[in-house]
Image (cartoon, grey):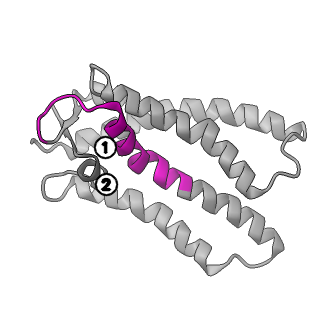
Amino acid sequence: MSRHPWDRLVAWFIDWLCISAWVVVTAVVGVAFYEAGATAGLSSGALNVIATAIVVVPVTIALAWLESSSREATIGKRSRRLRVVDADTGTRVPFPRALLRNALKIALPWMVGHAVVFEIVQTSEAGPVPGWLWVATAGAYVLPAVYVVSLFVRRGRTPYDWLSRTSVTR
């Protein structure tokens, strides 16, 4: 397996530019619903579930679909001539494993981040933010940092690559 951490980071940045377009669309719609009073009275938990269903789930599924497709890559990875393959055989990854990979890579830190933000907003209105929320906030940042650092150590495989038994190659 060849190492290419900078190419993977550039690919990640390109993918996030694409994801940001989806986030902007959903934010515009979400603000319109908020301004119309459609979200009034919803708990932070309910808002988090809605945000996850509208933003995080479609992004995670789309990335998994792209990585399990015949091109074996997201838009960013294709631009850097990278492919996601089975770590043992070098063959295309089935959709369930690509979904696991992207759930760990994208959905998990994003959902933790969402949950923390919604809880901080709600609890800060009632008083000081509880300590466990600050720990969860740290986790939302530490997890992606671990992913980035893992690109530069040993074989350059991330925890989500190991757990999904995938590898990123040229």
Answer yes or no: is residue 74 visible. no
Q: Quadrant of residue 168?
A: top left
Q: Residue at x 78, y 38 (%)?
A: 31
- Kindly identify the residue that appears in the image at 22 percent across and 27 percent down: 81
Q: Which residue is mark 1?
A: 9
Asked whether the beta carbons under mark 1 and mark 2 sit within 8 Å of each other, the answer is yes
34 falls in the magenta region: no
Quadrant hosting residue 93? top left
**Above or below 86: residue 139:** below
Residue type (three-letter) at the residue carrying disc 2: Val
Q: Residues within 10 Å of mark 2 (few under 14, many from 20)?
A: some
Query: Quick one: SS at disc 1?
Result: helix
The C terminus sits in image quarter? top left
- Image point (37%, 44%), residue name: 100
Residue 161: x %, y % from top left: 26, 48
Number of numbered callouts drawn: 2
Q: Position of residue 88 (x, y in %)?
A: 12, 41
Which residue in the structure is indicated by mark 2? Answer: 148
